[in-house]
Amino acid sequence: MTTLTIRIDDELNDLLTDLAKAQHRSKSDLVRDMLRRQAALAELRRTQALLRPYAERAGYLTDEDFFRDFS
């Protein structure tokens, strides 16, 4: 495992500390989870951008269009 050092302001540290205590997790565990989620969201956005032209050509302009046909 690699170590990453970051600087955060006191307000963010307090927020992270409170969240860690409330969830009975370490701050490091929370930050790792948050980074994983952000990476997954970035990948989802990238995939959506790649597929958007194909979806629009097929008539899917909104999420509702998609869910109407596939839910």
Image (spheres, grey):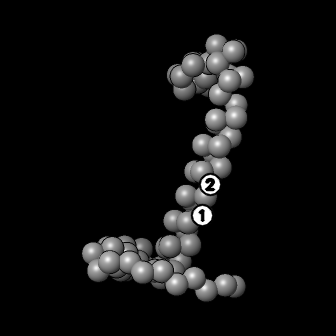
Residue depicted at x 61% and y 86%: 3
Question: How many numbered callouts?
Answer: 2
Q: Which residue is mark 1?
A: 36
Left or right position of 20 against 40: left
The answer to whether the residues at label 1 and label 2 have Cβ atoms under 8 Å apart is yes
- Image location (x, y in percent) of residue 32: 56, 72
**Category of crowding for the residue at label 2, using alpha-carbon neighbours closer than 10 angstroms: few (below 14), some (14–19), many (at least 20):** few
* Vertical arrangement, residue 45 with respect to residue 52, above or below: below
Residue type, numbered disc 2: Ala
Residue type, numbered disc 1: Arg
Q: Residue reaching furthest left?
A: 11
Residue depicted at x 61% and y 58%: 39
- Image location (x, y in percent) of residue 63: 54, 26
- Image location (x, y in percent) of residue 13: 34, 79
Quadrant where the N terminus sits is bottom right
**Category of crowding for the residue at label 1, using alpha-carbon neighbours closer than 10 angstroms: few (below 14), some (14–19), many (at least 20):** few
Quadrant where the C terminus sits is top right
Helix, strand or loop at mark 1: helix
Disc 1/disc 2 C-alpha distance (Å)? 6 Å
Helix, strand or loop at mark 2: helix
* Vertical arrangement, residue 5 with respect to residue 38, above or below: below
The quarter holding residue 50 reads top right
Q: Which mark is residue 40?
A: 2
- Image location (x, y in percent) of residue 61: 57, 19
